[in-house]
Image (cartoon, helix red, strand yellow):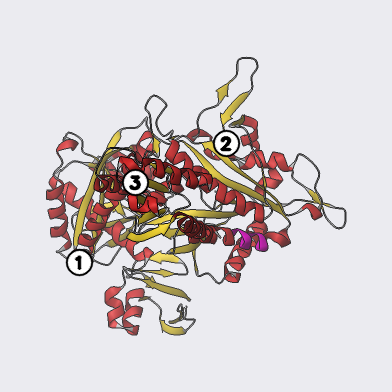
Amino acid sequence: MSNQIKISFPDSSVKEYKSGISSLEIAKSISNSLAKKILVASFNDVHIDLSTELTENGSIKFFTWDDIEGKKTFWHSSAHLLAEAVESLYPGVKFGIGPPIDNGFYYDIDFMEYDSSEINTSKIEKKFIDLCSKNLSFERKKISKKEALKYFKDKGDQYKLELLEDLDDGKITFYNQGNFTDLCKGPHVPSSKFIKSIKILNVAGAYWRGDEKNKQLTRLYAISFPKQELLDDYMLKLEEAKKRDHRKIGKELELFLFSEKVGQGLPIWLPNGHIVREKLIDFMYKEQKKQGYQHVTSPHIGSKELYVTSGHYEKYGESSFQPIQVPSDNDEYLLKPMNCPHHCEIYNFKPHSYKDLPYRIAEFGTVYRYEQSGELHGMTRVRGFTQDDAHIFCTIDQVKDEVIGVMDLILKVFKSLSFENFKVQISLRDKDDNSKYMGDEKQWDKAENDLIESVKVKGIDAVVEYGEAAFYGPKIDFMVRDSLEREWQLGTIQVDYQLPQRFNLTYVDKNNEKKTPVLIHRAPFGSLERFIAILIEHCEGNFPLWLAPEQTIILPINENVIQYAEKVNATLIDKGFRSSVDKRNEKISKKVRDAELKKIPYMLIVGDKEMESNSVSVRKKTEGDIGQKVVKDFIMGIQEELSNATN
């Protein structure tokens, strides 16, 4: 073995180092300030501890708090420290899992004889900070399965023993910091000194391994930061998020409701919400027509065999609504969990030539998926939802152009709704485990390369995430940041070579030979329920004019002008606007205030002066008073505003 290894850096530079050097030592050789900031590294795309010795050639990347990888590692280490704090205060508790999540981390804990309702979170936080101040190092240790089983058997931790049963001998590692040892593959930050603040955000129940048949554990949700100021800022944003909560605003604006009698996770759209929903559908319908889509409708249920053929039943059958038995025969049906198998049958309705492709079909199809009650959350996690689903059947050579066309559509949606801050993620196969994917390796290579090339053509900087692909193909995910800097996945494009084969889909090529088309799944909104929930929180319920359930309201100052107000209102309605008159015997200040609470974009105040000049005094929700305008001119102005918003 050579004493020297070659290390490649993201800027394409290559340097030689002595074999056995750690990534932290490499960082120090570049810059001491860099070495003080990095939390974790990756070597040949595998995340490693900074202390890991490198003994072969490879490429290295460093991650700080400013990187997602850095935050995830920081929060993972914080979960271990939280567990140590809990164990020191509540001896004998048992631990499940403690992963990082999008914002912070959690740990599932069995508090045994302790009353979980009386957990002192402030005391835990204080102990956590005390542990961090001790500059505890996170030490990795390889251990045999036999030794690992003995350790947790002696400790009496049945949850860790159950996790160990699924692990192969020779691939098991422990991490130790202070007086706490955990089963973990890592990596971790070098020391607890990086962690300066914590807040336990929520105490909830969670069934072990997500199975309602198992014991319910106590889940501590928390978040930590390298500076107290960052935690303070986060808590302020959290308070702002509560004000923007789509469940709260949805109730205030009468957009939707949930009813226990109807069933958990099954939203009902009220008239105002129905308008928002239908306007989004209308927007997407028009854009899809421009791109050559044909619209279809499929039933809300399907034969179980349909989903067996597609492979969805094998993958998701246990977590779906269970089959529906019919009285007359032995057939079984499922509530439709996705639209693509139905669309494959639509493609199969008649023979296709290469001249027919690409064949684009779209549906605003409602699907049903069983989510556990603890996972349900307003409109962002429901059991019945409508997707703006479309499927493109095309030749291999057409994939890139079709993907680019879908990206154009998604970007137009974002622009029309002021989602200006977003990133693009290319989700590829797991490099080490191909067992969870269907299909031929060459087809996967082709599909992944097509997505990468399509993003390059659009000039979009994209991050690549391995292991995030769907079971049938790679995908492009669009992640938007809302006005509170929270990240949401909106819009997805997936390339699928597998489903057309499973359904025996074919077309006849130029040489009169049968070929299998490629299938592109795409959904710019994702689901309407989730999209609208995110939009509500992004704009705090202040929908753009074209989406607002009520666009204008006429506010008469006195009874003498009510007839004129109704005349103006009728004109607006005749021009296609959603408008009303507030005829209540209230002061104009209260009418204005109530209209603002309803988040109506335009308030048109009319009195004797306005009636005499056939005008209105205009007050805009976001700008205040903007002056008196002749009715005709006002209508022309908002017509232009509407035109600019969606074109």
Hey, which quadrant is residue 62 in on the image? bottom left
Image coordinates of residue 505 in percent, x first then y, are 74, 45
Q: Which mark is residue 313?
A: 2
Disc number lying in front (3 or 2): 3
Measured along the vertical axis of the image, is residue 235 above or below residue 3?
above
Residue 585 appears in the figure? yes
Main secondary structure along the magenta-highlighted residues: helix
The residue range painted magenta reads 400-406
Q: Nearer the viewer, residue 58 or 291?
A: 291
Marks 3 and 2, how far apart in space?
56 Å
Residue at disc 2, secondary structure? helix
Q: Is 197 left or right of 271, judged from the image as shown?
A: left
Q: Which residue is mark 3?
A: 555
For the point 54% across and 37% down, which residue is it? 366
Q: Amino acid at mark 3?
A: Leu
Q: CA distance from mark 1 to mark 3?
A: 60 Å
Percent position (x, y) of residue 189? 29, 65
Within-10-Å neighbours for mark 3: few <14, some 14–19, many 20+: many
Q: Which residue is mark 1?
A: 193
